[in-house]
Amino acid sequence: MEAVEKPEEPVSSSPSRLAGSPNWGTATVVGVFAGLLYGGSKEASASVSKDAEVMLKMGSTQDKREQHRLMRDAMEKRFIRVTRGSLIGGMRLGMFTASFFSLQNFLAETRGVHDVFNVVGAGSATAAVFGLIMPGSLAWRARNVLLGSVLGATVCFPLGWLQLKLMEKANEGNNETSHHGEVTSGVGAAIERLEQQLRK
């Protein structure tokens, strides 16, 4: 008996998901790790002055046991501060990133268009929500919502334009067809573009 081989099917790009459009899960993981690094480094640099106080206390006593106890206490407190800063920073930036990219993907799928206004709307809404949950009075929160909305839209407009241009560049190869008339994968399209450039 001969084994029946299945012919390879061409890879087609889904119209609802363009290559280069952000992936919610990946962006959230990157945001969490960036927040962990930022929060931890911020707390580590803030604890330098506290280390100087410990060194002054250690210099004032001659007892070795007391010096070791002071050093141990300082290191434990520093470890707790840096760990706490890392966890809080990772949680904050992870939540912000997750909500931003999920809103952006929701707007892109709802509107059926991948454009700059998806990024602007997601940035404005996410910044407004995070302005709302900040502590303070009702008037202060309303001010934060308004300021966050405007600032989010202002910052996200050039970022959205840049993302749109990068997505167009990523999708350039998907529109080309191979010699057999089939849509090739991203790698195959990149190889064909390189071959065409070398022929010129």
Image (spheres, rainbow, N blue to C red):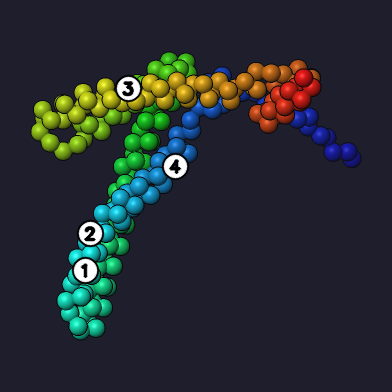
**Left or right of residue 47, residue 24 in this image:** right
- Frontmost of labels 4 and 3 is 3
Q: Is residue 18 visible?
A: no
First-in-chain label (1 vs 3): 1
Q: Which residue is mark 4?
A: 30
Residue sitting at x 68%, y 31%? 187
Say which residue label 1 marks.
54
Say few, some or many: other residues with alpha carbon within 10 Å of mark 3 (under 14 / 14 to 19 / 20 or more): some
Rendered-image quadrant of the N terminus = top right
Graded by Cα atoms within 10 Å as few (under 14), some (14 to 19) or many (20 or more), the crowding at tag 2 reads: few
Question: Quadrant location of residue 95?
Answer: top left
Q: 10 Å neighbourhood of mark 1: few (<14), some, or many (≥20)?
A: some
Question: Mark 1 or mark 3: which is in front?
Answer: 1
Lower position in the chain sequence, tag 4 or tag 2 = 4
- Amino acid type shown at disc 1: Val
* Sooner in the amino-acid sequence: mark 2 or mark 1: 2
Give me the disc on residue 134: none
Q: Secondary structure at mark 3?
A: helix
Mark 2 residue type = Ser
Q: CA distance from mark 4 to mark 3?
A: 23 Å
Which numbered dot is residue 49?
Answer: 2
Residue 128, x across and y down, in percent:
25, 27
Residue occupying image coordinates x 50% and y 27%: 21
User: CA gap, disc 1 to disc 3?
Assistant: 45 Å
Q: Secondary structure at mark 4?
A: helix
